[in-house]
Image (tube, rainbow, N blue to C red):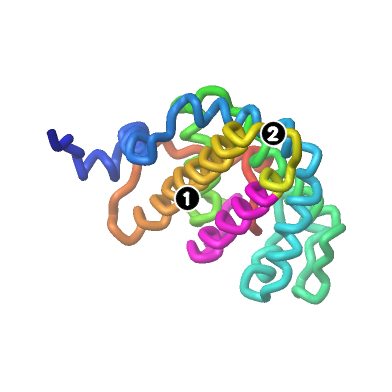
């Protein structure tokens, strides 16, 4: 029997949309458990993974340019031209820390409740210039390829880790894949909402500068 899906609610109800996407991808509690199991395997390599991500972002002028923007509290430290940017500067270290926190939360979250979905949405809003002074407009193409690159790094690390049963390794790889598709969908809605005049009915919240990872 064909299941009905309400198109309007897909664009206005975050939980409804997440439930649909999760069911379509067969993202279950078992996948969340696999991500939680993966966490202690990945954590020792997080600093290297994060550094690799930012070196990739610095390798293209179109992504590197976003880091000239000053974060709150770093007005006196930010570069004024991309030639002055340094990966080991105070502001870049702060950004690396934020991305590390984001990645660790994704892997350790035990319940994907409304608060967690709000967090993921807030990260998307921050990069789609929808969260006030703490946000910036990063074109969706850069977000998309960033997620793809992050997934590649995690899968590569997992694939080359010995001592994990093949069944569990397979389950973790599948869970990582689903994770990034879901996060990507949540991000994409922050961009589509502006062009389609559709948006999630969520309360406007001032972004906490320590809550999310800034690609800027």
Residue name at image x 80 percent, y 46 percent? 47
Which residue was labeled with disc 2?
Answer: 164
- Which residue is nearer to you in this view: 13 or 51? 51
Whether residues under marks 1 and 2 lie with C-beta atoms below 8 angstroms apart, the answer is: no
Please identify the quadrant where the N terminus is shown.
top left
SS class of the residue under badge 1?
Answer: helix
User: Rounded to the nearest whole Å, what is the CA distance between mark 1 and mark 2?
Assistant: 28 Å
In the picture, measured across the screen, residue 183 lies left or right of residue 215, that is left
Residue name at image x 58 percent, y 30 percent? 34
Badge 2: how crowded within 10 Å, few (<14), some, or many (20+)? few
- Which residue is nearer to you in this view: 151 or 115? 151
Number of on-image labels: 2
Question: What is the magenta range?
Answer: 134-156
Mark earlier in primary sequence (1, 2):
2
Which residue was labeled with disc 1?
Answer: 184
- Which residue is nearer to you in this view: 125 or 51? 51
Q: Examine the rendering and report whether any part of residue 63 can be seen.
A: yes
In the picture, measured across the screen, residue 38 lies left or right of residue 137, that is right
Q: Examine the rendering and report whether any part of residue 201 can be seen.
A: no
Label 1 vs label 2, nearer the camera: 2
- Which residue is nearer to you in this view: 82 or 140? 140
- Main structural element of the magenta stretch: helix, strand or loop? helix
Residue name at image x 36 percent, y 57 percent? 192
Q: Quadrant of residue 201?
A: top left
Q: Is residue 72 magenta?
A: no
- Name the spot of residue 150 as percent of width and height, x first: 63, 53
């Amino acid at each position: 029997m064909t299941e009905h899906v309400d198109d309007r609610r897909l664009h206005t109800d975050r939980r409804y949309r997440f439930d649909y996407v999760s069911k379509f991808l067969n993202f279950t509690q078992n996948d969340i458990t696999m991500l939680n199991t993966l966490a202690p395997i990945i954590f020792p390599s997080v600093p290297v993974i994060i550094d690799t991500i930012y070196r990739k972002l610095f390798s293209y002028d179109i992504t590197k340019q976003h880091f000239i923007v000053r974060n709150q509290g770093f007005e006196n430290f930010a570069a004024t031209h991309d030639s002055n940017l340094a990966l080991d500067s105070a502001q870049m270290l702060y950004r690396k820390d934020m991305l590390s926190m984001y990645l660790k939360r994704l892997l350790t979250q035990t319940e994907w409740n409304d608060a967690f979905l709000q967090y993921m949405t807030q990260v998307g809003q921050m990069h789609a210039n929808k969260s006030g002074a703490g946000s910036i407009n990063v074109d969706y193409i850069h977000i998309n390829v960033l997620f793809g690159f992050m997934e590649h790094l995690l899968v590569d690390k997992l694939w080359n880790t010995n001592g994990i049963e093949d069944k569990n390794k397979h389950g973790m790889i599948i869970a990582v894949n689903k994770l990034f598709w879901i996060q990507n969908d949540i991000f994409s809605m922050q961009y589509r909402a502006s062009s389609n005049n559709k948006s999630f009915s969520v309360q406007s919240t001032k972004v906490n500068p320590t809550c999310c990872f800034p690609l800027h």
